[in-house]
Amino acid sequence: MEFIDNKRYNFQANINANVTKTTKVSLKLSTVIDDKNSPVVSAADTYRNIIQKTNPVNFPIMFPAGSGPLGNETNILYGNMSFNGATFVNPYAELAKGYSTTFSSTVISTFELKQDLSMLAKGLSARALFSYKNWNTAKTDRSTVPFYYQISKYNPTDYTYTLEKIGTTGSDYLSFSKANNGDRTIYWEAAIDYQRLFGKNNITAMLLYNQRQYNPAFPSSLFDAVPYRTTGLAGRFTYAYDERYFAEFNFGYNGTENFIKDRQFGFFPSIALGYSISNEDFFKPLRSVVTALKIRGSYGLVGNDKIAGARFPYLTEISLGTGPNYHYGENMNTWYSGITFTRIGNEQAKWEVGYKANVGIDMEILGSLNLTIDYFTERRTGIFQQPATLPSSMGFGSTIPYYNLGEVKNSGIDASFTYNKAVNKDFTISLLGNIVYAHNKIIKDQYPEQIYSNLSHIGHPINSIYGLTASGLYGTQEEIDHGPVQQYGSGPKIGDIKYVDITSQVDGKNIVNDNDKHVIGSPTVPEITYGFGGTIRYKKFDFGIFFQGVARTSFILSAGNMAPFGRWNANVAQWIADDYWSESNPNPKAQYPRLSAIGNENNHQNSTYWLRDGSFLKLKSLEFGYSMKYLRFYVNGTNLLTFSNFKLWDPEMGGNGYYQYPTQRVFNIGIQFNFN
């Protein structure tokens, strides 16, 4: 539980007015104010400090008052331990050292004008919209610096000890620090719309121009201080004949500041066709069962101008006075520092382009069951990447520019259904469900051709896991001596993980290193996501349930971060204590290998030993309700059950879930008032 006093105030106002019969104006104002008081250290960080960064056998939370070196200390004697001049984390001291006050406000205003232009042409209208958003937050921290102590002398005979203070820091007064953040966004658009019906011909058209500007209030760099701006012209034309044949054409002519002048704009058209078979005369005999049937397809282009962590990739950045020194003068006794290239620009950088296609079918059966099935595919080209290696003769050093190098193909199926049935006036059923399967593979990337084919990314999905193949734990020294040389850390010991040398036939070497890693398991991003549920109403009672799940996904347990007594001084999980390799339990299939008081590089490698199936099915929500004339009483719960082969923590949290704040099971009891 996190001790937070959080107050939120939400103010909204909507004004709609008809200036004339053909002119409408609307103004919307929304203000959200948050005022929060909380500990300086969040609940999530406190949990992580307890699990991952502190072992309770090393030192106590605090020592008794009056037991300090001087005997008269008035401050709390927090326990800790000095190791190579550094201290560990005392979770309680961190939690109790102070408090934080955060005040934030979000203001959104939207002004919209609509004008009917039917006096010029029937079905013609125009509209304009202006929106302004401003967000600001101010955080103030008041905290002390804990006084830390450790045992310097200990007498095991009478259990007496002597304390010493660690370091010279510590304060019993509240210090002050502050942080501010914020941003503002300005957006406006203007559009002309046309809609007209000519007999069996239905025509619509739209032409829209928009601009957006985003400004961070406290930019972190020179580039960040330049407003983020985009602009674009979009158009749409649709044609439908007799509610049977449909066609739609869209285009976007988008502009970005991110590329050099001649490459700032991109044109991205698309076309879609549809055919409502159920509206044909020959389909009439089937309408008693299949009440509606439509097939459709589309093809189009989309663009992306965003590069992770980089704006204006065509610009070269230099840092003055940080390069090598150069000397000159009569006696060569005058020198200056040169420049350093912190980034090399690429003037050829341009939009990423995705070619998207979709074929789908919409069906209604017996007027109650609606089915939608889509097959989609996309080939994304020109993905921004930095070449993994470039010849040093090119002079780039570590400042490698971004190029449009990558290419990825993605395809899959998206299916959903809804079922709504009124059995009688007292009993209704509403069901829904969906499933999405999406599989991608890399066609081109920034890596050169690999000597070891197992290291190549080509043909594998994005977010694939690369790791070693593990074959249990070493049981004898003879196994180690006669097995391949494992080049991690100081080498394996009895009880450490044993790996398979999969590249010996390629290089003829009897060694295991990073060249032996290959794709293991499924991608970390699920390839299958699905959900299903529904609501049943009987007279005044209602019952709702919803399940959510994923499949074809894996994750790696974060072995290094879980290592008890290791580099992080982590706590000991129960499942490790119950089943780890030891001389008294030399189980080659133990859940955890040999324990070590220091980091064990051999055992912390990504491998099949730590690979886990990330699939799960969750009972996401459940609700019971009872309605009266103006009231509805309800009880509900979220995150109630999880069905998974992985049992150590919520599999949705992935491999780092060991030290993340656990997923909460929440129950609510409430009353809804309805005066309509």
Image: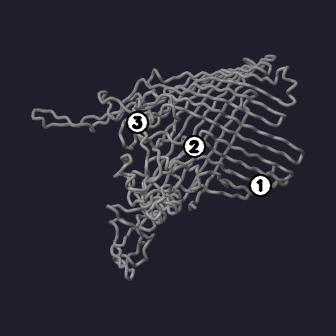
Q: Mark 1: which amino acid? A: Phe
Residue at the disc numbered 1? 624
Q: CA distance from mark 2 to mark 3?
A: 30 Å
Q: Which residue is at a point 42% across and 77% down the rendered structure image? A: 65
Q: Which mark is residue 505?
A: 3
Image quadrant occupied by the N terminus: bottom right
Q: Mark 2: which amino acid? A: Thr
Where residue 569 sits, quadrant-wise, is: bottom left
The image shows residue 89 at horizontal and vertical percentages of 42, 62
Number of the front mark, 2 or 1: 2
Q: Which residue is at a point 70% across and 26% down the rendered structure image? A: 115
Dot 2 or dot 1, earlier in sequence: 2
Q: Mark 3: which amino acid? A: Gln
Depth check: give the residue in front, 230 or 654. Answer: 654
Q: Is residue 435 above or below residue 47?
A: above
Q: Around disc 1, counting alpha carbons within 10 Å, would you say few (fewer than 14), some (14 to 19), or many (20 or more)? A: some
Q: Around disc 2, counting alpha carbons within 10 Å, would you say few (fewer than 14), some (14 to 19), or many (20 or more)? A: many
Residue at the disc numbered 2? 553
Dot 1 or dot 3, earlier in sequence: 3
